[in-house]
Amino acid sequence: MATYQYRCAGCGPFDVTRPIGQARPEEPCEACGHPSRRLFTSPMVIRTPAALARALQAQEASAYEPRVVDEVPASRRAPARSADPRHALLPKP
Amino acid sequence: MPEVIFSVDQTLSMRDQKIPGHNRWHPDIPPAATVSPGAEFRLECRDWTDNQIGNNDSANDVRDVDLSHAHMLSGPIAVEGAEPGDLLIVDILDLGPIPQPTSDGSGSGWGYTGVFARDNGGGFLTDHFPDSYKAIWDFHGQMATSRHIPGVRYTGITHPGLMGTAPSAELLARWNAREQALIDTDPYRVPALALPPLPDNTLAGQLAGEDAARIGREGARTVPARENGGNHDIKNFTRGSRVFYPVHVPGGLLSAGDLHFSQGDGEITFCGAIEMGGFLDLHVDLIKGGMEKYGVTTNPIFMPGNVEPRYSEFLSFVGISVDHTTDTNYYLDATIAYQNACLNAIEYLKTFGYSGEQAYLLLGSAPIEGRLSGVVDIPNACSTLYLPTSIFDFDIRPTADGPRKTDRGRCAVTS
Ligand SMILES: [Zn+2]
């Protein structure tokens, strides 16, 4: 089943569930019964931003075929500089 | 070898030592020894549970561990002339398992990794692994192997899990108040949100009677890290590390313990390091008035050590902050992202014949690297786990032939 959207001129948009491919061009408004035209909206998949889709794909793939890399990003080894400039003056070992 | 100023007879409980250590934070626990600024010395340490875990093939001891004994610490060590407001410099000179074992406890050529049951401490993936499991590791110099996780051999990244100074009475009261407030938000949660003071099995150094009982009622448990340092479980707190601890009480009162032969980033199984008894060599010094001079107030400052195993190839496992079972997005939740990265690594290792429990135990103890890769793609945090390939004695990389699944034994489980 899929959800299709219609808009009644008086009452606004409403949803109708029908088997895929069987949406009618018009449906009676669920509130007032007035014939209402179908709205064409973007399919669901487009709502996933490209960056998120890439991250989801990378995550899913890594359980079966993790990437092999030569080095680990240096985030922890070089911790972020302290906001307090006095910390840089602490005596090193 | 530096002078041993805190000695442990490893055939005896910490409670029965000539000068016992302690397992709560409290300013009134008297020093076990006093050193001058500039001193180098050795502390001998019990395993953090006071040796409740044995070198055997059952995880019953992990399931039944009594956490009211933990963490069994060596100290406190007073530093002459240290006053509140000073900074205490602590350098890690060396550490390791018991050099010449006299007993069969952990640190005597072996250590262990445990997964705690959900109703007794739990762990990072406790919803996926609710029971208790254990792996025994045998030490070969600085290398470790396990009969419970065959096919793996690696160099440990050895460090103390726990070190800190005593809190002042005022700071201790603030800890107790804020942690109780957290507990009160969900008092019946399992595992508990925080652990309030617990008189049962409190050890307060040389104190006895009513003095010791008061430490039991007021002393902070040692599980979380706080302003005084504490249980930080930083795997790069290795030889060569330097820490600056705020001094909150006269003498500073430094204590340490919970030695780890190795550990991955984030002690993901709670008992996920390779735990052991052993020794810890330190150098201490003082910066008078250092807290104000250097702006160190609420936390110690670490300079990580420069001694660690070196690897040149890693498998990278990715996780994002989505709960797949409920399709829930968690806003920039790096913990859930790292959990998913761990679960992906576990799934992958299972295709080589390891059980999920073996894989979980391995990720806690091996020198894996965890990275928070980015939180730019709102609402998802992305974490990545890097697993060195050369710790395996077979090719762990994905190949066209597919994974080589063979019988890889099993870890210790409960009966
Ligand atoms: Zn209408």
Image (cartoon, grey):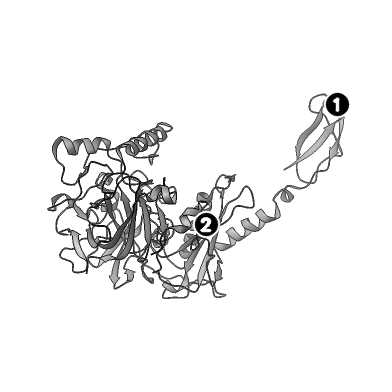
The three-letter code of the residue at mark 2 reads Arg
Mark 2 chain: A
Left or right of B369 in this view: B218: left
Work out whether B263 lies above or below B297: below
Q: Which quarter of the rendering shows the N terminus of chain B?
A: bottom left
Locate residue B104, reporting x and y percent: 18, 63
Query: Image quadrant of residue A6?
Result: top right
- Circle nearer the N terminus (1, 2): 1
Quick one: SS at disc 2? loop
> Which residue occupies the foreground of this view, B256 or B375?
B256
Tell me the residue that label 1 is attached to.
A10
Quick one: SS at disc 1? loop
Locate residue A30, reporting x and y percent: 79, 28
In the image, is the residue at mark 1 within 8 Å of ligand 1 by its beta carbon?
Answer: yes
> CB of mark 1 within 8 Å of CB of mark 2?
no
Mark number for residue A81? 2
The local crowd at label 2, few if under 14, some if 14 to 19, many if 20 or more residues have their Cα within 10 Å, is few
Q: Residue at x 57, y 48 (%)?
A: B332
Q: Quadrant of ligand 1?
A: top right
Mark 1 chain: A
